[in-house]
Image (tube, grey):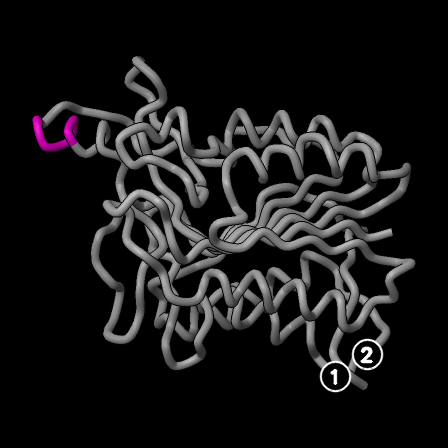
Amino acid sequence: MLHALTVGVDRYLDPSISSLRYARRDAASVADLLQQNLHPSEASVRRLLDAQATQRAISIAIGEELPRACRPGDVVLLYFAGHGSPETDGPADGASRFLIPHDAEKQHLFTTGIQLGLRFAEWLDRLADAALVVTIIDACFSGAPVAAAPGTGVRTFMGPRLQRARTRGKRRPPPLSLEAFEFGEGRLVLSASRDDEPACEDASVRHGVFTHYLLKALGEPLQRGGTITVAALFDRLRRETHQHMRGRQTPVLQGLDEYARLPILGPG
């Protein structure tokens, strides 16, 4: 059984958080691909889009509902498209990565954002029955405020505390990489870009660039009914995204599982 949750946020309650163009469409397209090509008895797909994608709703879905639904051997697919942000981690001089839900407050990301390193790891611990959990994140954490190229938008902003510290010239460590965390066997995270790179959405494809190639790979019609290893999927996403962005965006895979596979879903 495949359990999937797709989250996409273009619009934010906080007016100081800039809107995106294609994050909602990305999440809806991933959900559509799954729902249209997998039998309901084999897949449970839920989507949280824009105003639905609050911190509370995401927390309940991943931390409570999915653990109750999972049976031993099941597969979980988590997908997020929207803003990411580096921000200081509480009063210490550390920094961490935050996913930004619809109701996040830019001035209070530590409280209203979703901290990947700790909160997300706790959620994965609760999915102990799942044989495989694949998390796909089309967001970035570089804090870069400008577009990487004409026609593109960047899915990130810098947290205000980190921004103030850098403005005052204080030395702060870079955002905490997911590589520092052990998510456990069969727990894989595919991110759209490296720590210091943008994750872009492109008007020419009307998607996030990374998600555009994800949909293309999983919707490949020639392999209808087959599967693809996560490692092979990642190699393809890295190559095509890197080429599309002319070297400015390079997807990253954390975690290893040579047997992890996902279905090919394209129409025959």
Does residue 37 show up magenta in the picture? no
Establish if 137 lies above or below 61.
below
Residue lying at the far left of the rendered structure: 168
Whole-percent x, y for residue 37 in the image: 79, 72
- The residue lying toward the viewer, choosing from 208 and 226, is 208
Amino acid type of the residue that numbered disc 2 sits on in the rendered structure: Arg
Numbered disc 2: secondary structure: loop
Marking on residue 221: 1
Q: Which residue is drawn at 64% across and 73% down?
A: 217
Given contact means CB atoms under 8 Å apart, are the residues at marks 2 and 1 in contact? yes
Main SS of the magenta segment?
Answer: helix
Amino acid type of disc 1? Answer: Pro
Is 166 placed left or right of 39 in the picture? left
Residue drawn at point x = 33 percent, y = 47 percent? 196
Residue 136 vs 54, above or below: the answer is: below
Label 1: which secondary element: helix
Give the image location of residue 72, x and y in percent: 90, 37
Measuring from the top left, give residue 128's x and y in whole percent.
Answer: 79, 30
Q: Position of residue 179 (x, y in %)?
A: 51, 35
Q: Which mark is residue 148?
A: none
| Residue positioned 58% across, 43% down in the render | 254
Segment tinted magenta in the rendering: 164-168
**Structural crowding at the residue carrying mark 2, measured as other residues with C-alpha within 10 Å and reported as few (<14), some (14–19) or many (≥20):** some
Cα gap from disc 2 to disc 1, whole angstroms: 5 Å
Quadrant location, the C terminus: bottom right
Residue on which the image places disc 2: 224
